[in-house]
Amino acid sequence: MNAPSPWWAPHVHADRRPFLTARAQITATARDFFRSRGFTEVEGTVLQMSPGNEAHLHAFATDLQAPDGTPSRLYLHTSPEFACKKLLAAGECRIFDFARVFRNRERGALHHPEFTLLEWYRAQEPYQAVMEDCAALVAAAAHAAGAPRLAFRDRAATPFGEPERMTVGQAFARFADIDLLATISADATDRDALATAAATTGIRVAADDTWADVFSRVLVERVEPNLGIGRPTILYEYPAAEAALARPTAHDARVAERFELYACGVELANGFGELTDAAEQRRRFETEMAEKERLHGERYPLDEDFLAALAVMPPASGVALGFDRLVMLLTGAQRIEQVIWTPVVERGHPI
């Protein structure tokens, strides 16, 4: 049996090149999109003392050697978020970053260990503003690529026009017949209530599943496959327990100013009305790291510099968009490696 050809083999590159040239066109358009709206492009440092403090994110670690040889543990960032928020604290108002980011234990059709997040922030503006940015950016990117639709596998959506908007509570009721808000309060979640509701609708529930485990399973199995069909969907007002970096909504403390943009059943973007309460952010990070230690036997340090900056950061909204995925859906690529110029090579995996 012949081994698969590497990505740099001329015939493999020739097959991938149309996707890559479209990527270049979309990149240029995205930069023009933000500059025309008064944004400044920034570049967050990749090496950070904390890669982020979410329980299910896994980072790449390295050691910085001081001139005397003393090592200091650093990480490749999983997002430019901490760096961008420090820039907001410094006085920047509208910024965007085409960030190369790194996440371990992630590889598949839609996941790559090194990928591009297009992340942007608006100081003193509500999170509805970055929702609008998402819709307008997708349309501009489609025009640049000459793409009449977004497509992935057997699903399609128009990149033009207004996205569907649906709260997470509405989505759980519609697609899973579950009253999600009945299982949460402003400061707690009811694991047994959600587990019982999920099991009643045929969702598998294990004895050691937490509320978050059950929530994620319902979202993945019942909700996400139905989102972004025909047109993109903005799924918003996530439970506060699932929005560690977002502020609670003014009308209901059970839910937070977090949204995700979906197209063709694929998550494209994740945005927030940003939490600026440093003490509350510390509490949430510590909760996330305790869960990470329970699940994976490790935790990441808190970035004290970030928490100090958060205390003086102005109110803001921000969003991170998976740029490679957007290119995939606009070009018809089926695997993320098709739209990455030089994919990460693993032993036994040429591309």
Image (cartoon, rainbow, N blue to C red):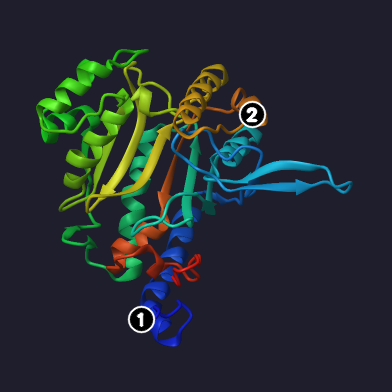
- Decide: is 252 above or below 75: above
x%, y% of residue 17? 40, 79
Residue ID for mark 2? 309
In the image, 44: left or right of 111?
A: right
Disc 2/disc 1 C-alpha distance (Å): 46 Å
Tag nearer the camera, 2 or 1? 1
Q: Amino acid at mark 1?
A: Asp
Q: Nearer the viewer, residue 318 or 239?
A: 239
x%, y% of residue 63? 71, 47
x%, y% of residue 22? 38, 72
In the image, 32: left or right of 240?
A: right
The residue positioned farthest toward the bottom in the image shown: 10
Kindly identify which numbered label has been placed on residue 15. 1
In the image, 142: left or right of 344?
A: left
Q: Residue at x 66, y 27 (%)?
A: 304
Q: Residue at x 19, y 51 (%)?
A: 231
Q: Residue at x 59, y 27 (%)?
A: 310
Q: Amino acid at mark 2?
A: Ala
Q: Nearer the viewer, residue 71 or 142?
A: 71
Label 2 sits on a secondary structure element that is: helix
Q: Is residue 330 visible?
A: yes
Q: Earlier in the sequence, mark 2 or mark 1?
A: 1
Q: Is residue 98 visible?
A: no
Label 1 sits on a secondary structure element that is: helix
Q: Residue at x 30, y 13 (%)?
A: 185
In the image, 225: left or right of 270?
A: left
